[in-house]
Amino acid sequence: MLTSMKNILEDSHKHYYGVMAMNCVNIEMARAAIMAASEENSPIIIQIGPKQMKLHGHKEEMYPLVKDLAERVHVPVALNLDHGTDYDVIADCINTGFTNVMFDGSSLPFEENLQKTEIICQLAHMAGCSVEAELGHVGMAVDDDDENFDLFTNPEQAKDFVERTGVDCLAVAIGTAHGDYPKGRVPKLDFERLALLKKTLDMPLVLHGGSGTGEENIKKAVSLGINKINVATDVCTVAKKAMLDEVEKNPKIDYVSMCIAAEKSMKEYVKYYINLIGSNNRFNFGDVEYHGHE
Ligand SMILES: [Zn+2]
């Protein structure tokens, strides 16, 4: 079912597990994610960014697609606008029926980020849509700025931000970055800061730049209170590899077979990821309570 992201994350916050948020721009991606989640009895978050909507997965097409797929499964599915910066785009997504919007004011001065986030929260909450904000700045992996501590989220400032905005979950900067890391480099995460953020805020926390972060880092981040992990690059890499492998095996392969191979590989990857972050068996069909394991 298509459901509020806030509800999904409140459960994962309470029970210390992570939920995968996968960027999807077409039917293969959305179906791979939702069907994998259904088979693993796991919640899932489908998300799409403004640039992705403009380039390929238009929201007018993605919304009914995700809604229809979500209605076919017994697990909760949320639809989130990833990295919204523009008020009109955010309002449009709320009107369309997205169940969460992210406002990314992380590059703005603190007070401006706070004021804009607060306005988005008022608007979204009135429509029953939840909000993710970002404080501190998760940069790009290519910029190699994961040791620039000035950009990391400050716990006391975050507390002030959350209290004054009423935001439902917060993306924190603790050392990950967006995109592919230079070959061989695994980011160093500031786990002490993460533990302090969780203790200070006592709310669902989000990790951006999940791709290439490494299994141990991800597991530890979840154990310390990360509840939503954004994965975009790694899924695209898996799909691309599956397509290229098929072409190598059979250069005469047709396009549909390539799409099927890509979807199959993404579905396997999502299942692997769900098990890595512990959201599997949270929604066993027939269970009265939806927590399969503690
Ligand atoms: Zn991000």
Image (tube, rainbow, N blue to C red):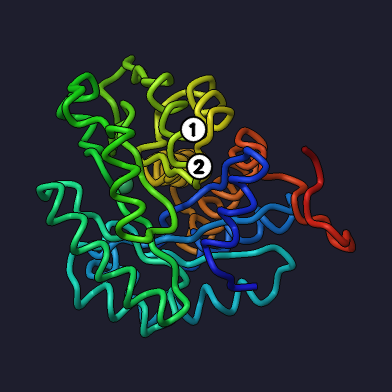
Tell me: residue 219, above or below residue 247: above
Find the distance from the CA under tag 2 to the CA under tag 1: 6 Å
Indicate if the residue with disc 2 has its beta carbon within 8 Å of ligand 1. no
Residue under the image location 53 percent in, 35 percent down: 225
- Graded by Cα atoms within 10 Å as few (under 14), some (14 to 19) or many (20 or more), the crowding at tag 2 reads few
Residue 291 position, x and y percent, is 78, 49
Asked if marks 2 and 1 touch (Cβ < 8 Å), the reply is: yes
Quadrant of the rendering where the C terminus is positioned: top right
- Residue that mark 2 sits on: 202
Locate residue 222: give its quadrant.
top right
The secondary element bearing badge 2 is classed as loop
Q: Which residue is rendered at x = 50% and y = 47% of the image?
A: 204
Disc 1 C-beta below 8 A from ligand 1: no
| For residue 261, above or below residue 180 | below
Mark sitting on residue 199: 1
- Crowding around mark 1 (Cα neighbors within 10 Å: few <14, some 14 to 19, many 20+) is few
Going by the numbered disc 1, the residue's amino acid type is Lys
Task: Say if residue 246 shows up in the picture.
Answer: no
Q: Position of residue 202 (x, y in %)?
A: 50, 42
Residue in the picture at 88% in, 59% down = 287
Q: Is residue 42 above or below residue 2?
A: above
Q: Measured from the top left, where is residue 37 in percent x and y?
A: 66, 54
Secondary element type, mark 1: helix
